[in-house]
Amino acid sequence: MAAPRVTMEVGNDGVAIITLINPPVNALAIPIVAGLKDKFEEATSRDDVKAIVLTGNGGRFSGGFDINVFQKVHGAGDVSLMPDVSVELVVNLIEDCKKPIVAAVEGLALGGGLELAMGCHARIAAPKTQLGLPELTLGVIPGFGGTQRLPRLVGLSKAIEMMLLSKSITSEEGWKLGLIDAVVTSEELLKVSRLWALDIAARRKPWIRSLHRTDKLGSLSEAREVLKLARLQAKKTAPNMPQHQACLDVIEEGIVHGGYSGVLKEAKVFKELVMLDTSRGLVHVFFAQRATSKVPNVTDIGLKPRGVRKVAVIGGGLMGSGIATAHILNNIYVVLKEVNSEYLLKGIKTIEANVRGLVTRGKLTQDKANNALKMLKGVLDYSEFKDVDMVIEAVIESVPLKQKIFSELEKACPPHCILATNTSTIDLNIVGEKTSSQDRIIGAHFFSLMLSSSDGGIFNPAHVMPLLEIVRTERTSAQVILDLMTVGKIIKKVPVVVGNCTGFAVNRAFFPYSQSARLLVSLGVDVFRIDSAIRSFGLPIGPFQLLDLAGYGVAAATSKEFDKAFPDRSFQSPLVDLLLKSGRNGKANGKGLYTYEKGSKPKPDPSVLPIIEECRRLSNIMPGGKPISVTEKEIVEMILFPVVNESCRVLEEGIVVRASDLDVASVLGMSFPSYRGGIVFWADVVGANYVYTSLKKWSQLYGNFFKPSRFLEERATKGIPLSAPVSSSSTSRARL
Ligand SMILES: C[C@H](O)CC(=O)SCCNC(=O)CCNC(=O)[C@H](O)C(C)(C)COP(=O)(O)OP(=O)(O)OC[C@H]1O[C@@H](n2cnc3c(N)ncnc32)[C@H](O)[C@@H]1OP(=O)(O)O
C-alpha cells in the first residue's frame, strides 16, 4: 500500500485542490497532518492560488485522526506523540488563512475529519455523507476544535447530543442544521466546491470563521441550563466515564470565555483524557473488534465467501424468531420451520412484533419493515429446504432431538448447505454424530441479554444483540467458517470465531460469574449489595437481577451443565432450588429476589430474606458461622477474578484465536464495560499477579472454587501479561 500522503493541484481557475490520501478511510496519520501543514502553507504563499478546496481521495473525506497514534501514546505513556493540530493547523493555517477554503466532503467525515471541515469557510457535501464526532467512544473528546465549532454551527443542544451520544448525521440533516452549505451530487462535488471557494474570494458568498460565531449559542443562561441538564443525564448514563463531563466543561469554557479559549482548554483536557485507562480500554476494544475478522487459516488463504441467499431457521421460539428477524431485516430470505401450525404462527407473530418494534422505535421505516416481512415464509416440512444455503437449528437443548434434526437435514438440504446449530452448551461433535457432514457443521451462537436496569432489564432478542459466536470443531471447513463470518457481518453482528467446548468462549468464561455471586451469598454477603457493587463497576445489571430476568429454570439447567463439565471448580448453591421451591421464578412470574411493578424499577423483596438464610444454613460455609466482611471492591473482585481465572483456561486451551477476541466477546455478549477494555484487558490493567495472589488467598480460605489456574499462576509469577499470545507448545489441547 502506498504511503499516506497529501497532494495539491492548482487549476487554471486559481483553485488549489488539496487531497488526503490514506486508504481505506483517509485517517489523519502523522504524515497526513504534516502534509496538510505543508500544502496549506504552500497554497497560502503561492500567488497563482486564489482559493483552496480540501477533499479526500476514494469517496471518503476522512475517518478522523489516526487511532493507531492513540495506541502508540498508550504504549509509550508519552502524550507528546500527539501532534499540535488544533491551533497550528486548524486555527492558524485553515480558519485564519487569507484565502478562502472550502471542504468538499463525501462518504464520511468523522472526528478529526469533520473538525478539519468545520475549520474551513464552507462545506459542500455529497448525498448521504456521514458526519459525526464519535471521539467519546474512544475515551477522549474532539481535539481539533470540534467541541467549539460544532455548537456554533448546529446549536448547543444538537451538538451536545451528537458528541455525548456519538451520534452521526447525514449531509442532508447537516444542511438543514447549517453544518453543510450545500448538498450536491458526487459528480458535481469538486466543481461546485471550486466555484464556491472563488465566490467567497470575490465576496459573493460569506467568508465564515465558525469559531467566531455566537448566533446559535443562545444566551449564557440558556446555555448553562442546557449544559446542566446534559451533565445530569451524563451522570446517569455514563457514570464511570470522565470524558462526558469533561466535554461539557470544555464546551462551557468556550461559551463563557470565547471559542479560542475553548480550543486551548480542549487541547489540554484532550491530552489528560487520552492518558486515562478509559481511553486505553476503549481504543483497545476498537482495534480488538476489527481484529476478530482476521482468522488464521480461514481469512488468509485466498478463499472467497459464497453467497448465502436463503436460510432456513428451525424452531420459532424466542431465539429462532430473533435469528430469523436478523436475516430478513438484511434481505436474506428465511424459511421458518416449526413442528405444528400453532407454534409456527406464534413464531411468525414474534418476528412480526420484532420488526414492528423497530418501526415504533424509529429504527426502521414502514416500507423496509414490509419488505423484510415479505422475505419470510413459514413451513411445517422440509420441502423448501432443497435450495437453502444455510440452516440454523434453534430448538430446545436436547441431544437426541438435535441429532435427529441433523440427520434429516443431511438428506433434505443441498450438499453445499451450511448446517448450523444455535446450541449454547452441547458439544458440536455430538450434535453431528449421526451425520457424515462434519465439515459443514458449525455453531452459530446468537445471544440475548438485558440492556438496562431501569425497568428490571429488557431482554434483547437475538436480532438486537451484537455478538455472534461462530463455533468450529476440528472438522469444520474453512470455507464454511468464512461463509458464516460473512453472513454474520451482513446481518450486522460482530462474528467471533471460537472453539468447541462446554459453554464455548463467553458462557464458559463467565460461568463462575453467577456461581461466585451465589458463593458470596452463602458466605453471608447481601444479595442486593452484590448487585449494586457490580452495577457500580459498570455492568448494566447485577448477577441476581440477571438471574431473575433469565428465569430460575434456565439457571438451574445451565448450572448443571457446568457442574458436570468442571466439577473441580464448580460451586453448587442451593439458592435457585430453594427459590423455585418457594414458587418463585424471577421476573417471569413477578416473584423473584426483586419485586416487579409496571412502570417502576425493581425493588429488593424483603420476603426473600428467610430463603437466603436457609440457603446459608444449608451451605454452611461461613467461617465460624459468621458472615464474612467485605468491601465493595472485594465483592467485585471475588466475582470477577474467578471469571478471569476461567478466561485463562479459555486462552490456554486455544478456544479463542487471541485474547482480544475474548475481550470483544465479553463486551458484546456479557455487557462487560467496554471502557474497561474487556475481561482480559481489565485483568492486565489490574495486574495478573494481584489477581493470582487474591485468588490464592481466597482458595485457602474458601476452597477450590477460587484456585488459580496453571496458566494464571505461570503468567503471574513470570510477569507475563495474560493477553500475551499463547505459544503453540503450551496449547497442546488447542481447539483451534
Ligand atoms: C483529535 C480528534 O478529535 C480525534 C479523532 O479524530 S479520533 C477518531 C475519530 N473517528 C472515529 O472514531 C471513527 C473510527 N472509525 C470508524 O468508526 C469506522 O472505521 C468507519 C465508520 C470510519 C469505517 O467503517 P468500515 O467501513 O466498517 O470499516 P472498518 O473495518 O471499521 O475500518 C476499516 C479500516 O480502517 C481502520 N480505521 C478506521 N478509522 C480509523 C481511524 N480513525 N484511525 C485509524 N484507523 C482507522 C480500521 O482500523 C480498519 O483497519 P483494518 O482494515 O486494518 O482492520
Image: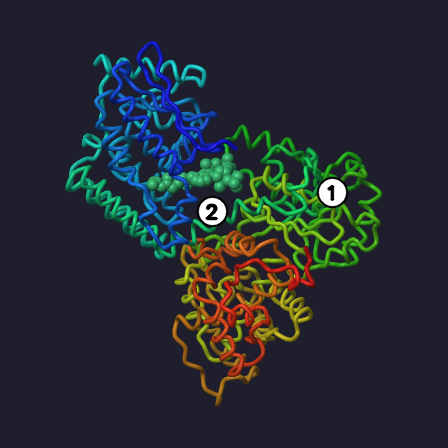
Quickly name the residue at label 1. 418
Element marked by disc 1: strand
Residue 342 position in % (x across, y down): 70, 46
The quadrant where ligand 1 appears is top left
Helix, strand or loop under label 2? helix
Of residues 682 and 232, which is closer to you in this image?
A: 682
Location of residue 104 in the rendering, given as x and y in whole percent from the top left corner: 37, 22
Q: Position of residue 102 (x, y in %)?
A: 31, 22
Taking depth in this image into account, of 322 and 282 the one nearest to the observer is 282
Residue type, label 2: Phe
Name the residue furthest top.
12
- Front position in the image: 44 or 697: 44
Query: In screen coordinates, is 637 left or right of 589?
Result: left
Q: Amino acid at mark 1?
A: Ile
Q: Quadrant of residue 120?
A: top left
**To which residue does mark 2 refer?**
286
Question: Considering only order in the chain, which callout, 2 or 1, is on the residue closer to the N terminus?
Answer: 2
Q: Are marks 1 and 2 in contact (CB under 8 Å)?
A: no
State the scheme by which the image is colored. rainbow
Indicate the position of residue 218 as horizontal and vertical percent values.
19, 35
Left-right relation of 102 to 337: left
